């Protein structure tokens, strides 16, 4: 068994504690999820149906015209960009406000997706839904039971 010396000074003077010094001097103190790029990305669901692939993006506050969806070399690109400006003029002051939101997501589509077919995109209640048809070869054939004689 090893004995470890207990240092009571760390209890009386917490700023003298090495763990606290390490924490405050590291980048982790200022590392907040709000500032990471992933936190600005919309949440995404991928649902693999038998005949199609459905992708949902949670993007509230956007409008249909704010999205750009493209497929190039079997890679799906989804971009959203919205800019708002407000200006209020009174006799003795002017108030201006603006906001800007944007995101870009790209990923490779599976080989089972027919990227030449029509992609259906809908936006309703803050959810962008994309439906892509699968290739005929990728659609599973129903199992056939064979009786053993």
Image (cartoon, grey):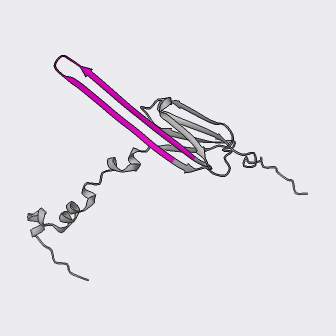
**Residue 109, position as x, y percentages in the image:** 61, 49
**Magenta residue check for 97:** yes
Image quadrant of residue 96?
top left
Left/right placement of residue 145 relative to residue 11 reads right
Judge whether residue 42 can be spotted in this image. no
Work out whether 8 lies above or below 28: below
Q: Nearer the viewer, residue 14 or 148?
A: 14
Tag count in the figure?
A: 0
Q: Where, quadrant-wise, is the N terminus in this rendering? A: bottom left
Point out the residue furthest to the top here.
91
Chief SS of the magenta region: strand
**Residue 54, position as x, y percentages in the image:** 60, 41
Judge whether residue 75 can be spotted in this image. yes
Left/right placement of residue 102 relative to residue 24 reads right
Image quadrant of residue 42?
top left
Work out whether 71 lies above or below 25: above
At 21% from the left and 17% from the top, the residue drawn is 90
The residues colored magenta run: 76-105
């Amino acid at each position: 068994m090893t004995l470890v010396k207990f240092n009571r000074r760390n209890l009386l003077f917490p700023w003298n504690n090495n763990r606290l010094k390490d924490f405050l001097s590291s980048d982790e103190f200022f590392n907040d999820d709000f500032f990471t790029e992933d936190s600005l990305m919309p949440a995404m669901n991928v649902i693999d149906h038998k005949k199609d692939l459905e992708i949902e993006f949670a993007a509230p506050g956007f409008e249909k015209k704010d999205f750009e969806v493209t497929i190039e070399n079997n890679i799906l690109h989804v971009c959203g960009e919205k800019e708002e400006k407000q200006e209020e003029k009174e006799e003795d002051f002017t108030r201006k406000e603006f906001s800007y939101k944007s995101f870009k997501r790209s990923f490779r589509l599976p080989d089972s997706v027919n990227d030449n077919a029509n992609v259906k995109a809908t936006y309703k209640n803050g959810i962008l839904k994309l439906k892509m048809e699968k290739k005929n070869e990728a659609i599973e054939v129903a199992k056939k039971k064979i009786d053993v004689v």
